[in-house]
Image (cartoon, rainbow, N blue to C red):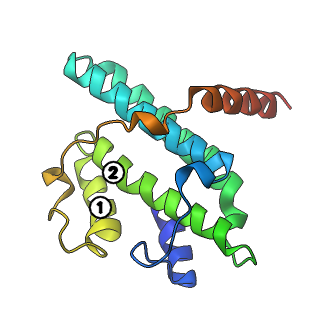
Amino acid sequence: VLSFFTTYAAIDGYDPRSWQAPAVAERPDIDRWILSVLQSLARDVNVEMEAYRLYTVVPRLVSFIDDLTNWYVRRSRARFWKSEDDRDKGSAFATLYEVLSIFSKILAPFMPFLTEVVYQRLVRVVDDAAPASVHWCDYPRAEVALIDESLERRMATVRAISTLI
């Protein structure tokens, strides 16, 4: 996903400092869905880690990777290609940038080297004021306002139907 993102971001000149992303509420359902799932993940990982139930965290991380790669990116590929709808493309780039940046922090205790590469290639190159390492960042807390459980349930239904077909 990092390679996909950086390839198309370079082609289109995407820079999170200069591209204006629509507010989350104005983004397409698929963007709001992946952001919601990410925030649900952050909430759940925090709860489980604070209770020392780390064995429940890894399956959730793997599930999120599947959500991101096999559903979000596959369904959004065309949005990243040259198109006439720059607002939709901007939404897709902003969403994937946010997801990768936050997910690298969530995943850091479990995959320290890979997440460091992601953080360095995405965050540090555009924000000199960011901590020098993903491991120096505060652990993400869920932004509860971005969690839309109804949207997550609807998307789970769509995915189940798609799998059956």
Crowdedness near tag 2: few (<14), some (14–19) or many (≥20) residues, C-alpha within 10 Å: many
Question: What's the residue at 36%, 20% (across, down)?
Answer: 56
Measured as percent of width and height from the top left, residue 6 is found at: 47, 72
Question: What's the residue at 51%, 44% (across, down)?
Answer: 35
The correct choice, above or below, for 136 with respect to 162 in the image is below
Q: Is residue 33 left or right of residue 109?
A: right
Measured as percent of width and height from the top left, residue 112 is found at: 23, 49
Residue assigned mark 2: 104
Measured as percent of width and height from the top left, residue 88 is found at: 67, 65
Measured as percent of width and height from the top left, residue 57 is found at: 35, 26
Residue 156 in view here: yes
Query: Which label sits on residue 79?
Result: none
Amino acid bearing label 1? Tyr
Of residue 104 and residue 117, the one placed in the foreground of this image is 104
Query: Which label sits on residue 119?
Result: 1
Q: Is residue 114 left or right of residue 15?
A: left
**Mark 1–mark 2 CB contact (< 8 Å):** yes
Residue 1 in view here: no
The correct choice, above or below, for 87 with respect to 10 in the image is above
Amino acid bearing label 2? Ser
Mark 1 and mark 2 lie on one chain; the one further toward the N terminus is: 2
Question: What's the residue at 17%, 60% (across, down)?
Answer: 133
Of residue 130 and residue 52, the one placed in the foreground of this image is 130
SS state under label 2: helix
Question: How far apart are labels 1 and 2 at the CA level?
Answer: 6 Å
Question: What's the residue at 70%, 52% (across, down)?
Answer: 75
Q: Is residue 51 left or right of residue 146?
A: left
- The C terminus lies in quadrant: top right
